[in-house]
Image (spheres, rainbow, N blue to C red):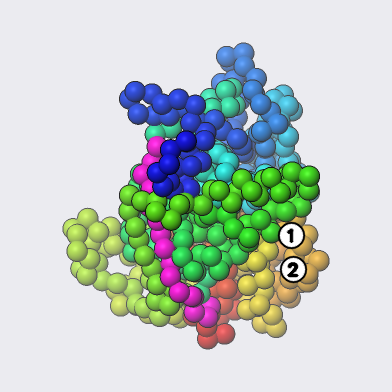
Amino acid sequence: MTSEARTMFGKIWEAHEILRHPAGPSLLYIDRDMIHEGSFHAFADLKRRGLKPRRPKQIFGVADHYVPTLGRSAADAASPAIAKMIDTFDENMEWGGVRHFGLNSREQGIVHVVAPEQGITLPGLTIVCSDSHTSTQGALGAIAFGIGQSENAHVLATQTLWQVRPKTMRVTVNGSLGHGVTAKDVVLALIAQIGAAGAGGYAIEYAGQVVRGLSIEGRLTLCNMSIEAAARLGMVAPDETTFNYIRGRHFAPSEQEWDAAVAAWRELPSDNEAVFDREVVLEGRDIAPMVTWGTSPEDAIAITAHVPDPASFASVEKRKAAAKSLEYMDLTPGTKLDGLKIDKVFIGSCTNSRIEDLRAAAAVLKGRKTAVQAIIVPGSTQVKAQAEAEGIAQIFRDAGFEWRESGCSMCAAMNGDVVGQGERCASTSNRNFVGRQGPGARTHLVSPAMAAAAAVTGALTDVRKL
C-alpha cells in the first residue's frame, strides 16, 4: 500500500483495480450492477453467446424508466411495445436468476432511489447501471457511474469492466445555505458556474460545511446532477450521517458485521494532504433559489434575476446557443423570471422524489390550492407508502396534485407522461434539453419547494415569499 496521501476516489479505485492495460484503461471489479428495462440488449447479447450472469446475487433489477404511473401492470403501459418491454424485463431477470423488483413489488421504484433506500448502495463499492444518473449513489461514498448496454453485457458476464481512470475535482461549498435554498440550488449554481462541460473527464468529490450539513437525500441530489456538468461521477465522503442512514436497511451489513463495516468505511475519506486535479469553491451564502431559463442545466440563474441577453455572453458559441435556447423557450431578454406563467408542474425523478423532497413541497402546499395541472410521482413504492402514512399524500391531493405510482414518469417522457407541445413546466427533474419532457416541451428546472410554489401561483415564484 502506498504511503502517499490519497483521495477517496483513488482509494476505492485502487481497491477494485484488477490490472492496468499498458494503453491506460484499468480492469475494475464491479460490486453491484443495477438493471432496468432497457437492459434487453445486454441480455440478448448474453443469450446469443451462450453466457449467463456470473454473479447474479450482485445484480439487482428494477423496472422504472418505462413503467406506467397510473397503474401497476404492464397492461397499463403507454403502448403494447412498452408493455412487452416490461414483460421481457421480468423474463430476463428470471432467466438470469437475478433478484429484481417488478411493478408489483413493494421495493419497486426508480433505480437510484431504491438502491440507497434498500441498503444496496454502500460506501466503498463500485456500482454501475445503464443510466447516466447512477452517479446519484456516490452520495454514500461509492464509485457509481453509468454504462452502455455492451458494457452492461460485459459486467453481467464477468463482474468486471474496463474503464479509463478519470481525473479528480473537489467542489467545496463553504458556510451555510439561506432560507429556501436546497441541494438542488447548490448543484444548479455549480453547473451555472463551471458550465455543462465543466467537469468533463473528472470524478467530483463534494466537500465543505454545506455538504456536511446536508441529509443523505440532499447529497443524493448533488451527486445525481454531477452528470449535467459532464462529470463521470459525483461522491460525498461517508460520515455519521451516512452510517445512521444505512444502518438497519434491508441489504445493509447485519448487526454482527456492522462495527467491522463502519471501521472500514471510516478509512475511505480523502486524506488531509490529498491533491485534487482541480478545485472549485462556492460560498453557501451566495446561492439563491435557482431556476433554468434555457435548454441546458448550465442556463440557471437566481429566481430574482432576469432572462439574460445572448449578447452578454463572451463566446460566439454561447451567444448562438443562448439565442437558440430563447427561441425554443419563447423568452425575450430582460424578462423577469419571478412571475413567468407556467402550464404544468412535475415533482419527481431520481433527482428530487425522496421523502424529504416531498415533505419540502408539502410544507409549501399545505392549506393552498394549485393553479395549474400538477403531478407528483414518488421515487419508490416505499416513499409513496411513507408519504401516505405521514399524511403528506393527502396534502398533495387536497392541493389539487395528481398522486401517482412510482417511476421515472415525466422526467424521461417515454412512459406516457409528457409535457405538451409549447407548454411550460416547472420540473424537479435533472434535464431541460429540447424535447426532454415531450416534443416542444419547455422545462424550467427547480427544487421541490420552488415547484410547489409555482403550482400554487401558476408562475415561477420565489418560494421565500411563501
Is 174 part of what is drawn in magenta? yes
Q: Amino acid at mark 1?
A: Lys
At x 51% / y 64%, what residue is drawn?
A: 211
Disc 1 crowd, CA 10 A, few/some/many (<14, 14-19, 20+): many
Which residue of the protein is positioned furthest toward the right in this rendering? 389
Residue numbers of the magenta segment: 165-180
Residue 127 - label: none
At x 78% / y 59%, what residue is drawn?
A: 385
Q: Camera-side residue: 37 or 414?
A: 37
Residue 102 figure quarter: top right
Task: Give the SS element for disc 1.
Answer: helix
At x 73% / y 48%, what residue is drawn?
A: 258
Left or right of 306 on screen, residue 445: right
Q: Which residue is mark 1?
A: 384
| Above or below for 25 versus 260 | above
Q: Amino acid at mark 2?
A: Ala
Q: Camera-side residue: 16 or 235?
A: 16
Q: What separation in Å lies between label 2 and label 1 (alpha carbons)? A: 8 Å
**Residue 336 visible in the shown view:** yes
| Above or below for 234 versus 28 | below
Q: The C terminus lies in which quarter of the figure?
A: bottom right
Asked if the residues shown at circle 2 and circle 1 are in contact, with their CB atoms under 8 angstroms apart, the answer is: yes
- Location of residue 264 in the rendering, given as x and y in whole percent from the top left corner: 61, 45
Q: Which residue is mark 2?
A: 393
| Above or below for 167 versus 344 | above
